[in-house]
Amino acid sequence: MTRTEHHRACHLCEAICGLTIETTLEPDATRRITSIKGDPLDSFSRGHICPKAVALQDIQNDPDRLRQPMLRSGDQWQPIAWQDAFERVAERLAAIQQRDGQNAVAVYQGNPSVHNYGLMTHSNYFLGLLKTRNRFSATSVDQLPHHLTSFLMYGHGMLLPIPDIDHTDFMLILGGNPLASNGSIMTVPDVEKRLKAIQKRGGKVVVVDPRRSETAAIADQHLFVRPGGDAALLFGVLHTLFEEGLARGSHLPVDGLDQVREAISDFSAEAMSLRCGIDAQQIRQLARDFAAAETAVCYGRMGVSTQAFGTLCHWLVQLINLVTGNLDRVGGVLCTQPAVDIVGSTSGGHFNRWQSRVSGLPEYGGELPVSALAEEMLHEGEGQVRALVTVAGNPVLSTPNGRQLERALEGLEFMVSIDLYINETTRYADLILPSTSALENDHYDTTFNTLAVRNVTRFNRAIFDKPEGALHDWEIFVGLARAFAARTQKDLKPTMPPAQMIDHGLRSGRYGDASVHKLSLATLDNHPHGLDLGALQPNLSERLKTANGHVQAAPDVIMADLARFRAAPVPQPDQLLLIGRRHVRSNNSWMHNYHRLVKGKPRHQLLMHPDDLSRRGLNDGQQVRVSSRVGMIEVEVVGSLDMMPGVVSLPHGWGHARAGVRMEIAQNQPGVSANDLTDERQLDVLSGNAALNGVPVQVAAC
């Protein structure tokens, strides 16, 4: 037997931890994984890994993972040849578009798309040929307000300032639980050690969350906030900074700060206290502590994105960093300068150039909010969606009102999924086209290098050979594009493999042929543990993409949204509000088919404060019925002092026991889908992002 060590980054979450993977070549010439460990020589992750990384071997070996194209006939699936599959897809989609128009075909792209570089480089090679305006993705159940805010303020949706966690003295975290997520819109391996390092050097960590999360448990201070109340808290903080003269100047050119100051003049800490559930004096003290720190970071994540005022939240996060002098400052928040610069090589984006047919929701970057997907299928008339292409996504479990989406999928004329599994969504497809596994692929992290807390780069070589008859994800899109172009007599531009594109990006980039680094794929092959290109440095002033090269502190559409905030009713104190929950062993809905990740204590339960249990005559551990405007589920309830009174928490991504799903381990897990309760009508109206947090619910005994 021959043993070989391989070094590559884990692709399963944003932390991109470095791994040392040992494989053994057996006498029968098969190669199997015998060890997965953290790579101590990776300068970024420093040997850290989480439990998900060890499960890479389970994904590779999973008998439920599809390994050839599958055609559905009734409730049965049968293999089909690749070319036959491509031609069937082309024939059906072309016929539907010819009859009903281009927008009769919709596209949904899931979260794993950014974890596989072939999807990033080549999905649009085919999807772009469809010329449909009905494109949707997981972005609008997650980080859309981040991108819209950066587009409006800085001129590019990916010009995202990242917390300089390794050098800051004060870190304020809202709507984020990095100990469970491993960081998000902040690529930061070993985040717990980095947060504790802030405290060790005399700094402070403050967490604002309706639940005492894993991150809140290690913080210096935790503030319970009413779900959906983060904007009120942030308004109170910003108002205090202005009112008490705590603002500092900025080296950046800024337009509109005086307009902001005037517009929020009535949003004092006292006025905002009732709306966020935090005492006015605590709001004022938080502002003072933040301003007094030598360097500070205000960081908001998914919990403040997925609420009714998600864009206002992220705009306020940026303003608080700006007015305290912490935007584009070491120890504050800084933009990366990555080896492959997607900001420098792409346009800034666009917003609201068209709207969805039924509800008039705005597009961003060519995508409509996914809350509109089901209604675009169900609402009859000109422009109705008749066919769907899904890419590495499971919107039945991942988007609001999943049961309504199921009904919509049942009525489609045709559906094709590029996916590895027959899951809650792809079971409705006519064809499923599975790619090779991650370990059979090369990979480069264009997105997560752009979001990293240091400037880092590495190229990840495949560990296993591509199996005979299999195709990489990018090859699937090339095959689909060729078949569709031939069917519709469209010209198809030549393309190249993803690795060649990355090599070109490296060579032409900041650290490429014109620099001392001379980065290329060949260079990175000589650095199997990754390459550290240095700490983040101020660079925003020269990278701004706004029309006049200034930070826009008061974008018109955001200032107009203040009226909606003012008009919002004060929350009723007796109304239960639902929030989500993450766990380090999960990644949305796609990590539950591996025994090592689902074993241990159950984590599917509804968490509720003991006082709320008592008021409803409920007992710890009993089955309860949870209902909202759109649906009802039954689940075990557990009393927890970690919950804010009036708030209940249900984890996202469960609910696999549905007919037709072929994921044996996942199907046998308890738990229900939180998105059978979330409401597609609850939105951040400005961006169209789904409001998955703060959903009004009722809880009663079964």
Image (cartoon, rainbow, N blue to C red):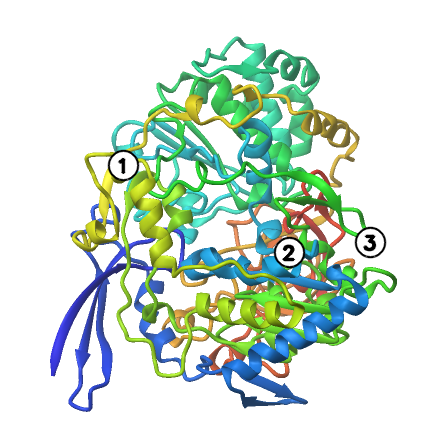
Whole-angstrom CA distance, mark 3 to mark 1, is: 50 Å
| Residue highlighted by disc 2 | 136
- Tell me which corner region of the image, top left, top right, bottom left or bottom right, holds residue 199: top left
Q: Secondary structure at mark 1?
A: helix
Whole-angstrom CA distance, mark 1 to mark 2, is: 40 Å
Residue at the top extreme? 245
User: Crowding at label 2, few (<14), some or many (≥20) Cα neighbours within 10 Å?
Assistant: many
| Residue highlighted by disc 3 | 358
Query: Which numbered disc, 3 or 1, marks the residue that appears first in the sequence?
Result: 1
| Residue highlighted by disc 1 | 197
Taking the image as shown, residue 682 lies to the left or right of residue 396, namely: right
Query: Which numbered disc, 1 or 2, marks the residue that appears first in the sequence?
Result: 2
- For the N terminus, the quadrant is bottom left
Please tell me whether residue 466 is drawn above or below residue 288 in the rendered image: below
Q: What's under tag 3, amino acid-wise?
A: Val
Counting from the top left corner in percent of width and height, residue 53 is at: 32, 64
User: Which mark, by number, is residue 246?
Assistant: none
Taking the image as shown, residue 543 lies to the left or right of residue 444, namely: right
Whole-angstrom CA distance, mark 3 to mark 2, is: 15 Å
Residue at the right extreme? 381
Q: What's under tag 1, amino acid-wise?
A: Ala
Q: Residue at x 34, y 28 (%)?
A: 168
Counting from the top left corner in percent of width and height, residue 363 is at: 69, 45
